[in-house]
Image: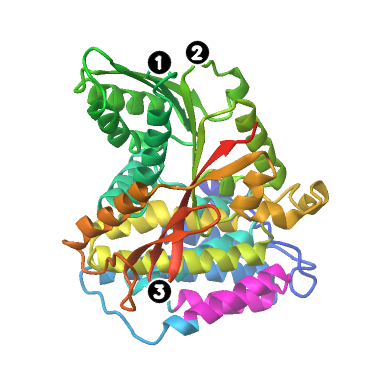
Amino acid sequence: MGDIVDNEEEFLSLRLAIVNDSSCCNHINKKIIKKRKRRGLMMNFINTWDLNESNCEGKILSLLELREMMLKNDVKKKGHIVVEDGKGLHLIHSLLISATSIDENTIDLAIENLHELYQNVTLLGDSIQRMAAYFADGLIARLLTRKSPFYDMIMKPPTQEEEFLAFTQFYKVSPFYQFAHFTANQAILEVFEKELEYNNELLHVIDFFDISYGFQWPSLIQSLSENATTLNRISLKITGYGKTIDELRETETRLVSFAKGFRNLSFEFQGVLSGSYKLSNLTKRKNETLAINLMFHLNSLSTYSKISKTLKEVHDLCPSIVTIVEQEGCKIPQTFMPRFMDSLHYFAAMFDSLDDCLPIDSIERLSIEKNHLGKEIKNVLNYDEGGNNNNSSRYDDNEQMETCKGRMESHGFLGIPLSCKNIMQAKLLMKIRSYSNSTIQIDGGINGGFRVFEIEDPRAISLAWQDRSIVTASAWHCVM
């Protein structure tokens, strides 16, 4: 140890915490080897330890080195991208073996396949290669515990600025969020109009979970203003939940500034930090139309008991409408393999759709995939499963909680059929976008692209990429 310089002492306490596997992880012996020339922070972590050939930890460090090489090669190849055909099925097969092996605690086989993956994936390749790179990151992070510095390196979230930029870029180029927001807003608007006789022209929307910079609400503000007059002003209050105070302040500034352009509308925004305020504490104005917006929220909750608690709190408020929009993937309240399979299908569609929205060498596409979709992949594969193993014991019929219809009806809600006008609006959105993007289909078709189709019982609307539904919107009301 005498040949290790003082400024490297911090490395002595760094240990990879690997999931236990009797076949390769027992009797791990660590020795400090001589100092080697720095090759970046990543190489310092790897080269600090003398690892036995059979040591599982050494194999994972080798994987991390491969990952670093992949990222460096991508930087060198930037601007000279060559997409190799025929690798897609092989990469998917390797991902499936890796995930199954991790789930069954067969770590050697998982590492072997991840090793092969990192030699064939790239962030600058075709959609499967790019998606597989982020899935490989999510799987290798799953081999580590939260105490590992390498886990932090792989799972490092984007900055708030990077996240916002990626969100806005995705919003502009893909119909994904526009479909979700416009469909929910139209349902809210129609319920508000039905209650005009007694709601005193007061509308209160609770944007639960994540206000997402307020992108959903300008279209609702504009639609409400079209139905208002200077003598009969409509009052809109939005209570929005956000991750940070800064995000809430920026959202408030943006929405208040936009609403000032509509003099026949009174607007108020109340920002609430997520987890700091109970729904039961929110105040309601007399006779107001109350709408609860659950945008991508229920599937993000880690247990069915949390979903049930949320729906009970929502029901206690007796809202006029609850709008629900969920991805057809990324469903957290599942065991690992079903969650992995759902996510694999979902993100394959999402990455594939981006190929037709943006050029393969687009800086915007790289930003969206790294700081938005890639972040989601790694999070959904590594959410904290603690306390989630006994979900089935909390419900007589666990399958009932696995579908939106089952969840809502078991908690006192009935579906509100989305109107023909709402369905026409969604198809019109696709038609407008189709003028600049030939991959969008209005009424289906065998050629693929984005499609809008209806779902019965209750009447809901889905946006699909080719034959894969990626997001579904529905509306509900309380059964008194």
Lower position in the chain sequence, tag 3 or tag 1: 3
Task: Work out whether residue 343 or residue 262 is closer to the camera in this orientation and state it.
Answer: 262
Q: Which residue is depicted at the point 45% across and 68% down?
A: 468
Lower position in the chain sequence, tag 2 or tag 3: 3
How crowded is the residue under tag 3: few (<14 C-alpha within 10 Å), some, or many (20+)?
A: many
Q: Do we see residue 34 in this rendering?
A: no
Segment tinted magenta in the rendering? 91-119
Q: Which residue is mark 2?
A: 286
Q: Looking at numbered disc 2 in the image, what kind of residue is underneath it?
A: Lys
| Residue 200 image label | 1
Q: Given contact means CB atoms under 8 Å apart, are the residues at marks 1 and 2 in contact?
A: yes
Residue 422 sits above or below residue 17 on the image: above
The question of residue 116 being in magenta is answered with yes
Task: Work out whether residue 100 or residue 279 is closer to the camera in this orientation and state it.
Answer: 279
Q: Nearer the viewer, mark 2 or mark 3?
A: 2
Q: Looking at numbered disc 1 in the image, what kind of residue is underneath it?
A: Asn
- Residue furthest to the front: 197
Q: Looking at numbered disc 3 in the image, what kind of residue is underneath it?
A: Gln
Which element carries disc 1, helix, strand or loop? loop
Q: How many numbered badges does the structure rendering display?
A: 3
Q: Which residue is mark 3?
A: 129
Q: Do we see residue 166 in this rendering?
A: yes
How crowded is the residue under tag 1: few (<14 C-alpha within 10 Å), some, or many (20+)?
A: some
